[in-house]
Amino acid sequence: MLKEGIGRRQLLALGVGGTALAGLGLPLRLRAAPERVDVAIVGAGLAGLNAAIILKELGASVRVLEASERPGGRCFTRDMRSHTVNVGASQIGTNYARINDMCRRLDVKLGPGSHINAPYAAVMGENLIAAGDWSQSEFNRTLGDERAILPHALSDFYLGQRTPFEEFNDWRGPEAAEYDISIAEWLHRQNASPEAVRIIREANGNMSLSSQSVLRVFQESTRARADMSRFSTEHRQTLDNYQIAGLISLHVVGGTSNLTTSMAAEVAHDLRLASQVQAIDQELGRCRLTLADGRFLEADYVIVAVPFSTLRHIRFTPALRGVQAEAVESMTYSNQSQVWFGVEAPYWEEDGVEASMWTDGPLQHIRQVIEPDGSRTKLSAICSGKKAEFLDAMPALERGEFALREIERIRPSTRGKLEVLGVHSWNEGIVAGGCSHTLPAGRTLEWVNNMGEPHGRIHFAGEHLRRIELGMEAAMASGEEAAIGIAAKVLT
Amino acid sequence: MNGSLGTGCVAAGANRTLQLMVLMLLPMAALGEAESINDLSPRELMLGRIAFMQCSACHAASGEDSAGKLGPSLYGIFGREAGSSASFSNYSPALRDAEFVWNNETMLIFLADPAALVPGNLMAFPGLADADERNMLVRYLRHITDGED
């Protein structure tokens, strides 16, 4: 690359790197010109990696800038003592076409899913109630038809199973306007009892149901219903949608990170880790990215494939406007805080109650992992919303101890049988700023139809821009859409 | 699914009407296809290749192995009755029961809004709003699927 009469390679031959030059305050004409690529991609999660792979395959030059020290975003497999744990995305739906195809292309093995949604017992206050006893339990204060529904399945009963939509895209159409209401309002219209509303709120990390849109739930359930319609098994009669999803989904053998690591290997030397983008300026028909360490990169186009919780810390010139600016600034991300345990003996055999527990206490869901081979060696306490905030207020070591004592308190048969493996919170670190996006009641329709629009030469991607897909597949689809939108401009 | 407030019956009626309109278009379609579709310029080939990127996770197009893909191979699709590929067994009832033949016109209508032409089909694709992009994709599909009408 030759510019201003002196090339970067020549400067490097003199032992002077771009960063060092910036620090020396040399005249502009003597500095190395910023590297220039067709497309800069911010974020090396599934969306950014998929966009990079597509663009490279088509012949574009790309550079992926990832702020953290690892690729994968919310696909993250951690080693906790002798256990491998997916602390992020794990379930791969049978209709996740892009994920399945990418795994096939990269020879990443898929296997049957872990049954993380195994049947739950209920814990109400101090009281442990076996699933079979729930409908007649004195601690079951729900009414009418609700009484037969286990606490963890009430949300699916009132929300998931009652989607008014038929087609995957209906939730974004004009007829969806009458459903751009809060979950609380929907439950009121369905005549849910106050206790049912309380239980659903508890399962939502005790976050308010008055601000979250029910449309997001309906998008998921409309899509999931179609996926499950392929499976007319006896499970559909006895299990709720989440349990069925657990049974029929796939997982990446060895952990979800095996997929994102393989995708990162495809991107190869065009991926830069520890490269946090601070600003993106558009001028004179190009984009200039400023990194936190003072480096620059120039690109014809940019794909920003990070959650809005991260994106809002990037300075755009010209600034984002209108609905897009509103969504970027104010989209709420629910955190997820996890404590993982090794299970040293089958405590559920001692008291004859289901191993997994839904609780209205601080730990929310306590899930037993049933591996495809039937082994039951892991347990996780999963908290979201305010319950996650409560856990995160403690140092990591205390968090594990607290969760262990809490489980032993509500489930005496676990005493001496659990070992804390580790903790993980998606609110910590620079990657995500939370685990899962929420959409605001009354604004969802406007947001989902506008917040992902290109801003000049900047396109956006990420799971939060889902249209008709879910989870990991939604991230892949959004990266694909951004890549295709840009490719026609760059390559023809 | 319990408690659905859906508009399935209305949609099914619209589906039948649209499919009848499609059948009436067939003679015109045959005329429309007289123009050569194999003379794509390099730029058009690239545009088609880019557009097909949104199909390729689910569909093989040429004679290559489509094992592991969620949708049927599109090889030889033009001239074939909808939902009738002998090598694919996982059609939705909606597409299996559809009554039209794939040609330029039906493909264009389908790609504009798949759920409008075949409500209840399981192809997770919201449709291409841009008419030029649809035209380009259909021409490219004709080119790579090597089918004859």
Image (tube, helix red, strand yellow):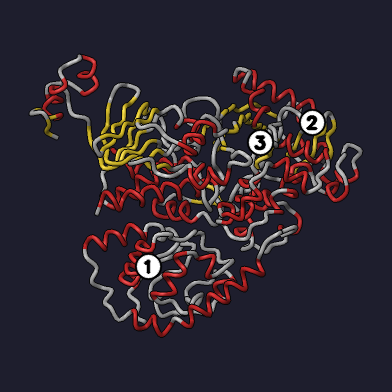
Mark seen at residue B98: none
Q: Nearer the viewer, residue A259 or A230?
A: A230
Mark 3 or 1: the one toward you:
3
* For residue A235, side relative to residue A173 (left or right): right
Q: Quadrant of residue B50?
A: bottom left
Residue where numbered disc 1 is placed: B61
| Alpha carbon separation for disc pair 3 and 1 | 46 Å
Q: Is residue A375 visible?
A: no
Mark seen at residue A211: 3
Give the amino acid at mark 2: Arg
Q: Earlier in the sequence, mark 3 or mark 2?
A: 3
Image vertical order of residue A193 relative to residue A329, above or below? below
Image vertical order of residue A239 relative to residue B102, above or below? above
Q: Is residue A417 visible?
A: yes
Percent x, y of residue A28: 16, 21
| Quarter of the rendering occupied by the C terminus of chain A | bottom left
Residue where numbered disc 2 is placed: A411
Residue under the image location 64 percent in, 62 percent down: A229
Give the amino acid at mark 1: Ala
SS category of the residue bearing label 1 = loop
SS category of the residue bearing label 3 = loop
Q: Residue furthest front?
A: A322
Residue under the image location 22 percent in, 30 percent down: A34
* For residue B82, side relative to residue A3 (left or right): right
Mark 3 or 2: the one toward you:
3
Label 3 in the same subunit as label 1: no
Give the amino acid at mark 3: Ser
Q: Residue furthest bottom?
A: B27
Residue under the image location 39 percent in, 54 percent down: A105
| Quarter of the rendering occupied by the N terminus of chain A | top left
**Neighbour tally class for label 1: few under 14, some 14-19, many 20 plus, Cα within 10 Å:** many
Label 3 in the same subunit as label 2: yes
